[in-house]
Amino acid sequence: MTIYVYDFSEGSREMAGLLGGKGANLAEMVRMGLPVPPGFTITTDACRVFLATGAPPEELDGQIARHLAALERAAGKRLGQADDPLLLSVRSGARFSMPGMMDTILDIGLNDLAVLGLGKTPERERFAWDSYRRLVQMFGSTVMGVDSTLFEARIGSLERQHEVADDSRLDTVDLIRLVESFKDLIAEETGEEFPQDPAEQLRRAVLAVFSSWNGERARIYRRREHIPDDLGTAVSIQTMVFGNLGPDSGSGVAFTRDPATGRPGVYGDYLPNAQGEDVVAGIRNTVPLQRLADLDPGAYKELRASMDRLEGRYRDMCDIEFTVERGKLWMLQTRVGKRTAQAAFGIAAQLADEGLVSPQEALARVDGDALAHLMFPRFATSGPGVGEVVARGVPASPGAAVGAAVFDSAEAVRRAGSGERVVLVRQETTPDDLPGMIAAQAVLTARGGKTSHAAVVARGMGKVCVCGAEGITVDLARRCFTTADGVRVAEGTIVSVDGTEGVVRRGAAPLAESEVMRYFEAGGRAPGAEDQRIVHDVHRLLTLADSARRLEVRANADTPEDAARARRFGAQGIGLCRTEHMFLGERRPLVEAMILAATDAGRARALAALLPLQREDFTGILEAMDGLPVTVRLLDPPLHEFLPDRSDLAVRIAREEAVGRTPAARDRELLAAVERMHEENPMLGLRGVRLGLVVPGLVAMQVRALAEAVVARKRAGGDPRAEIMVPLVGDARELRLVREEVDAVLADVTAESGIVLDCPVGTMIELPRAALTAGRIAREARFFSFGTNDLTQTTWGFSRDDAEAAFFPAYLDRGVFERSPFETIDREGVGRLVEIAVAEGRASRPDLTIGVCGEHGGDPASVHFFHAAGLDYVSCSPFRVPVARLEAGRAALPPSSADSST
Ligand code: ADP
Ligand code: MG
Ligand code: MG
């Protein structure tokens, strides 16, 4: 027979999967001998049966009845008995704490008769009716589905009649009237009476908790937090204790350390003469927990002792709910407390200092997301100057930024050029918005999720971004956006973008600078006495991570500035240096000339003009990364991306013709070239290695520029370590052909300069065919670098920009994926190709170096996968380098250091 019900004394915190977090932790406290009101927990198994079949398991009623009888025996009173009845709370609790679940119901067991028994002495009368009022209200709204505002409205009007500020001033007669009024309300709204039978109250409350697993709030929360839909919730049923029995009673919450900063001490709130939910509901003003020391020294002392024991047991900061009933302390809940990013680092470092956890465990307690938070400037959390909210969206790239709202890229660039700080507001962004995004402090979009163009690019640049602010309407023509409430925000309005919370406010909210970012920008040296605590903590944990990790961390950097920053942030080289930008800007005419060249000689001339420019670029980057590998990718995008836009050209030509002038010959040539080179599917067209094989001289020019830069750096006494990476290879023969050309150029430059050049040639693995034939490709390649962005696109067969806008929301919503495969690597599919390529590549070349240079290289979960897959390094944007270092260290920890106490 399956056991669906466990007494608190039968469980432990290891059983959170079965008993839910709340039930498991209640059981743990009982095991520790802490004062916990007795009770039992119905398992998540029972909930899963209910979810699957629509009915609870047959055995459940019987098992509940047996446990209830035991509870009644121990308490010496029965549920529903007329004088001094046993009362219960019914509490939901899933494996992971989920704010979307059903609210707890207190005082189950009261009815028209029992309330008289409970309030049989005059001093308990008000308390009894207050408890009954709470039960009818909570049961009516959560179990019977009556709109909770209707109850509140009735309390409100009574309070107004009496001119009292809150419900604690209502007297017994008021409460009796309220109960009657609530019962009427329930009958009116549902056509059903409030159930008087305590057993029915209990049964219906339990089933309502089960059902709430699939409520909309819970579903939305699970999606956001990537919690699986099939876990189900447990239900804990517990003997009531009362904090609302008078001034010698009360309820409170406590943290064993400050959840905002991590500092040790006593943190919490206490509310005399109140039941638990009053404390958090914020209806009455609480007092600081320390006040309990004066109000009730005995209870306070016992609470402090319990807090110390809990922290010792959980070896982490705990969050506690308690109630004092007539001077007696009762523990009602504990869990490992949620904390800010700052506190996460602070607590981990302190626990290690105190010897409560090992350094490895301390490292397991922090994560890359928390570190990323600490690197962004933040808004001061409260105080004056915090303006009205004008947009809410997805917190896509954390941090805080203030600027004037602008509505297109050109305006952003123009204003930023004159020193103004701007926030780029767009319906959604495209690669055309790049200049504006670079110029802006922050980006706000009305559409798109965490992996939309705006989000990905902003994160890569370390820019603040709120995307998918569905409530706003962007009106480019009128140069404004309209909020959900119809308020117009015109161009030039100063707004504050909080990328950590996903909120945009009007006006300039005060900013707090990130100490941690300053630490990285200064090169991550050991902090001194003048540095803030958090810098010490971050340094300590990153040092631990660096010594634990096996993966190296490189950066994706295309300019000397980015390379230098990456180095300060701890990068051990460049894993991807894109050369596209070396073909843009003022160099466009040269690139156009190369593309348009009718003869080999003409093309050679154009390439020769580009060569010295590219050599300078490479020299700067190699200098910034002196002594560390710099992996240069040969030109990858289709060439027509470097030509003017087709319709721009056509319009220009038509306009000239319309006024009787002859259009410029070059425009005609360009248009012809654009039309000739048009591709239906550029992502799968003439790009990558294919370009090098088709456009004579293109590879040679790039390799020569790099080789000459290496020579220049060597002559200057440097230690340049250039590597050449060929993109989009699908077959070993493609790579062989390019490599032969590369080798020839390297030999030439060696002969000319007298300096021996060893630039390893490798390839990106970004097509399934490359992964599947990795053994053969490895014979031609000294290294592999997984281009997981393209590999994800080509494995799934969707193009990111199209897919994200068109159907990702539906896929995420319908559970096809829990996360976008562009955010976190798809282990099953793309990951499998990675594993095959690693195994077969190493089998044919044991010293093959293998890395990854897609967006995934800086994603925490993906870093763990790459560690497990045996890669040598990950490469990510400079701003993600510290995150990757931390996660690479965590990935290398033995499994036993992982935290099991959630
Ligand atoms: P949540 O998950 O929202 O924190 P809880 O189950 O902890 O919900 O309950 C809500 C409030 O009711 C808490 O303040 C809790 O302390 C209080 N509470 C729950 N069970 C009891 C009980 N048996 N006696 C007194 N107060 C209780
Ligand atoms: Mg609680
Ligand atoms: Mg690619």
Image (cartoon, rainbow, N blue to C red):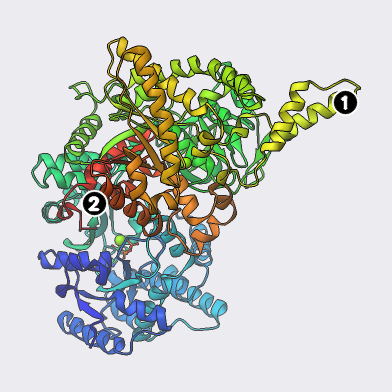
Q: Which mark is residue 254?
A: 2
Tell me the kind of residue under disc 2: Ala
Is residue 223 found left or right of 128 in the rendered image?
right
> Which one is in front, 373 or 323?
373
Q: Residue 657 carries which label?
A: 1
The reply to whether callout 2 and callout 1 are in contact (CB within 8 Å) is: no
Name above or below for residue 771 compared with residue 233.
above
**Which residue corresponds to the image point at 37% horizontal and 45% vertical from the top-left?**
777
Can residue 275 be seen here? The reply is no
How many residues crowd around disc 1 within 10 Å: few (fewer than 14), some, or many (20 or more)? few
> Which one is in front, 778 or 665?
778
For the N terminus, which image quadrant? bottom left
> Which one is in front, 365 or 761?
761
Nearer to us: label 2 or label 1: 1
**Which residue corresponds to the image point at 40% horizontal and 41% vertical from the top-left?**
764
The x, y position of residue 178, in whole percent, is: 46, 71
